[in-house]
Image (tube, rainbow, N blue to C red):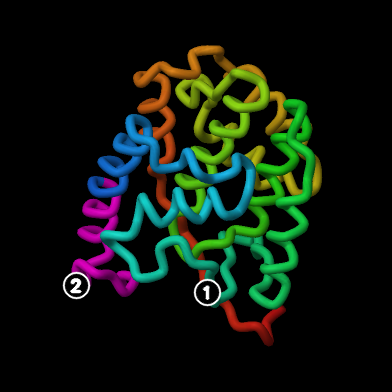
Amino acid sequence: MALDNKLNITDSVELARMEEKISKKKAVELFGNAYLDNYKTGTYEMLAAIHQYLFDEIYNFAGKVRTINLAKENFRFASVMYLQAALENIEKMPQSTFDEIIEKYVEMNIAHPFREGNGRSTRIWLDLILKKELYMVIDWSLADKEDYLLAMERSPIKDIEIKHILKQALTDKIDDREVYMKGIDHSYYYEGYVIYKAEDL
């Protein structure tokens, strides 16, 4: 079953194809325009603005905090009941060093504030923090997809692995459109979420 969407697509494969096409186009626009200039880097407000920009043509929930509980394989993301408090705490986290920034990124992944499109939005958000604070970004083509996904799965318990993978992929090419586009391409992978009920917690 496809998620409810503004395109009235009922086939999940077709929806995924259109979602990728539209949100990639919007991500390219973000690189070249001043849409995010009025948002403070590292805030949830900026992340929500990114998400809304990428997905507003597709979903009514673009830029809005999810109202359902989500899990991926055996990992359950933050419960809706505690999500707002989690986002407020994440916003207060420091972001002046590489380790602090990745710790903040890991916590935002655990929060998973949106119904769909968290990975794509949060990776752009991460790069904007790195760009502002360290004058660096991630060259996502240098981060092996499987290693990255496994490290992200383990990061709530131990984040040393994801820090190592992302540190090896750092580059100072902060205004390089090609590096940015590699990151966008890297972002599109199957996100197998499972909706679960509050009573299952």
Which of the two labelled residues, at mark 2 and mark 1, occupies the earlier sequence position?
A: 2
Q: Residue at (66%, 42%) from the top-left corner? A: 105
Q: Residue furthest front?
A: 38
Q: CA distance from mark 2 to mark 1?
A: 21 Å
Of the numbered discs in the image, which one, if any, rests on residue 94?
none
The residue indicated by pointer 2 is 8
Q: Quadrant of residue 89?
A: bottom right
Q: Quadrant of residue 183?
A: top left
Categorize mark 2 by other alpha carbons within 10 Å: few (<14), some (14-19), many (20+).
few
Q: Quadrant of residue 132?
A: top right
Placement of the N terminus among the 4 image quadrants? bottom left
Q: Is residue 84 magenta?
A: no
Q: Nearer the viewer, residue 118 or 145?
A: 118
The residue segment tinted magenta is 1-20
66 to the left or right of 62: right
Q: How far across and down, in percent of the image, does residue 178 sit?
A: 35, 19
Q: Is residue 7 magenta?
A: yes
The residue indicated by pointer 1 is 195
Q: Residue at (60%, 18%) from the top-left corner? A: 135
Q: How far across and down, in percent of the image, does residue 131 sit?
A: 57, 25
Q: Is residue 156 above or below residue 31?
A: below
Q: Is residue 112 above or below residue 31?
A: below
Q: Nearer the viewer, residue 34 or 193?
A: 34
Q: How far across and down, in percent of the image, does residue 174 sit?
A: 49, 18
Amino acid on which disc 1 is placed? Ile
Placement of the C terminus among the 4 image quadrants? bottom right
Q: Nearer the viewer, residue 178 or 72?
A: 178
Q: Residue at (46%, 42%) from the top-left corner? A: 36
Categorize mark 1 by other alpha carbons within 10 Å: few (<14), some (14-19), many (20+).
few
Q: Residue at (60%, 53%) from the top-left corner? A: 44
38 to the left or right of 18: right
Determine the secondary structure under disc 1. strand
